[in-house]
Image (cartoon, grey):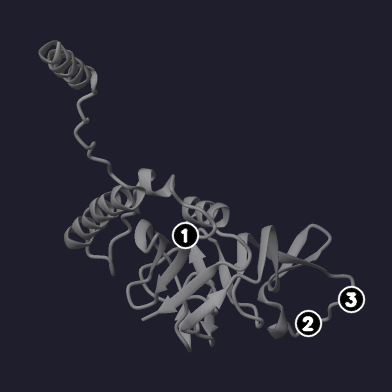
Amino acid sequence: MRHSFYLLIVALFISACQKAPTPAAPEKTVTKTAKRKVATDADRARYEAFRKCVNLRKSYKVYENPSLLAKSTPENTKIVVDVSEQRARLLVDGVAAYDTPCTTSAKHKFEPNTRTYRDKHTPLGTYRIKEKIRNKRSTIFGFYYRGKRCVYRGDKRKFRGCKRGLRYVGHPLPYWMRITNNGIGLHESGYIKRYPGTNGCIRLPHKAAKLFFAKMKKGGTVIVQR
């Protein structure tokens, strides 16, 4: 009787062990931080390869990383302008997602296309975007018209004629983003040169100006460095 009882206990124990689930091997999980780091390392390597094969001070070539641009948010995106290279970069998580030629200023420099001596400089420093206007017009540089005829173009402060009967039209500054209180900002321009030549503002090609305007918010960071 006792022998049968022991056999029953052993049988029940063996049955329970057979039904118990085998512990699953731990899954290899990749955290969001790890995924982001891998992507960022690849993006950084891609941009460094671009820098090595392009003369940034002279070239008009543009660098674009669509996958990194897709990750851009107002919080992780900023603009860096390098006056020594005359380049503007849109950084996402600290990595260049877009790099374009731009034109900044050089103090007391003669600009052949407008026959104007530029007497301001693009100030270095870290700024916040104070104003965004899609279709801005300059309050300083523009045209005086008498009827439909243009009688003056350039800096209206230097106009010495009679203004009676004249109509002033400011020069267009599309995708305007102001960074200082004294009129310095980024905007689109058709005059992008590989040397300084503005009156202080930062000129961008059309595509870059439109992209930067869309990706940046008011209060966003703009760094101007040498």
Give the residue at mark 2. Answer: 161
Q: Is residue 133 left or right of residue 64?
A: right
Alpha carbon distance from label 1 to label 2: 50 Å
Q: Describe the element under mark 2 as helix, strand or loop.
A: loop
Residue 203: image location, x then y, percent: 50, 66
Q: Residue furthest front?
A: 1
Label of residue 164 in the image: 3
Q: Would you identify the image quadrant in which residue 10 lies?
A: top left
Residue neighbourhood size for the residue with mark 3, other residues' Cα within 10 Å, grouped as few (<14), some (14–19), many (≥20): few
Answer above or below: position of 66 versus 205: above
Answer above or below: position of 100 versus 11: below
Question: Callout 2, which amino acid?
Answer: Gly
Residue neighbourhood size for the residue with mark 2, other residues' Cα within 10 Å, grouped as few (<14), some (14–19), many (≥20): few
Mark 2 near mark 3, Cβ–Cβ under 8 Å? no
Alpha carbon distance from label 3 to label 1: 51 Å
Q: Describe the element under mark 3 as helix, strand or loop.
A: loop
Q: Is residue 159 left or right of residue 22?
A: right
Name the quadrant of the C terminus: bottom left
